[in-house]
Amino acid sequence: MQRLSIVIAALATLVGTSALAADMAVKAPPPPVPAYTWTGFYVGGNAGYGWHDPTVSVTPNDIVSSATTCGGAFGGTCIPPTSFDIHGALGGVQAGYNWQINQNWLLGLETDFDWSNIKGTGTSNFSLLGSPSSFQASENIKWFGTVRGRVGFLPWNNLLVYGTGGFAYGRVDAQAAINSPVLESADFITGNSYSCTSPGGAGATNCFLGNSSRTATGFAVGAGGEYMLWNNISVKGEYLYVDLGHGNTTNVAAQATVPGAPIPSSFTASYSRVDFNVVRAGLNWKLN
């Protein structure tokens, strides 16, 4: 009987230990972490830098502007093109929607709008009626926006790399001026003339002046990466090439004429294609 009691006690201990171990095995694993999904709407902000290298060429529009520069009859020379750099900071907002197709691929649509300080000025020198003179041109991309599709790859659940492309638009302002110490020139047959004595006296700024402003359209392409910090906050870095088509054409007209020849003599300043580069960083907040 004593041996039977020992056997029964040993079996009870073994059964109890097994039950406890089984109970511990069920409770030990932590609860599963829900997988993050990129699907949903998001909004955010961005800041960055842009740059562009425009060229501006000049052609005379009438017999007076031609004869006193490229005509050569009075010691003038053609106005050479000016090439210069424009650059500056930019910043704005973006919003979009992502659709995560599977564990590794994503499709999306994004729109953004940035205020811009991408601007600069260039100068070239020439001879007007044999006198040293200068041509000055500037360009300013005041703001731009895009509407783009995105195709993304997820090497890890919280890291997105993507290519992007779509429609772009922007405000492009241009200004040009010709300054010279020449007093005046006129053709009383055609009525074209210019005078640099007014405003401001001989050699004053804006002897000839012109400006233009337009909203241009084109396309944008680029690539970037985005990293999820928390379930609804991500940071991104991006490069875009933005092409807004042909450049501005600006009529650079005399600001004062000679009595008896009232038609302002003028030149045409033609700007090269408006295509610029953008690098920027941003922060996104996923709404759902």
Image: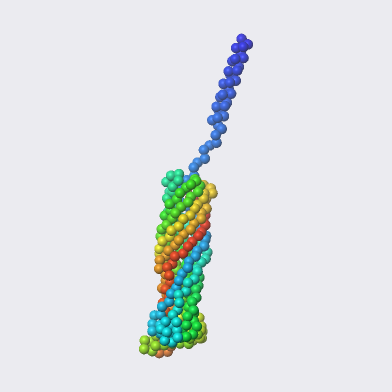
Pick out the residue farthest to the top. 1
How many numbered marks, from 0 up?
0
**Residue 82, relative to residue 9: is it above or below?**
below
Quadrant of the frame with the N terminus: top right
**Residue 87, relative to residue 222: is it above or below?**
below
Pick out the residue farthest to the left. 189
Quarter of the image holding residue 250?
A: bottom left
**Looking at this view, is 90 or 267 the one in front?**
267
Kindly identify the residue that appears in the image at 47 percent across and 47 percent down.
154
Kindly identify the residue that appears in the image at 50 percent across and 81 percent down.
205
Q: Position of residue 13 (x, y in %)?
A: 60, 20
Asked whether residue 175 is in view, the answer is: no
Kindly identify the residue that appears in the image at 56 percent across and 24 percent down.
19
Asked whether residue 25 is in view, the answer is: yes
**Looking at this view, is 25 or 64 the one in front?**
64
Q: Position of residue 145 (x, y in %)?
A: 45, 61
Kindly identify the residue that appears in the image at 45 percent across and 75 percent down.
81
Q: Position of residue 194 (x, y in %)?
A: 44, 85
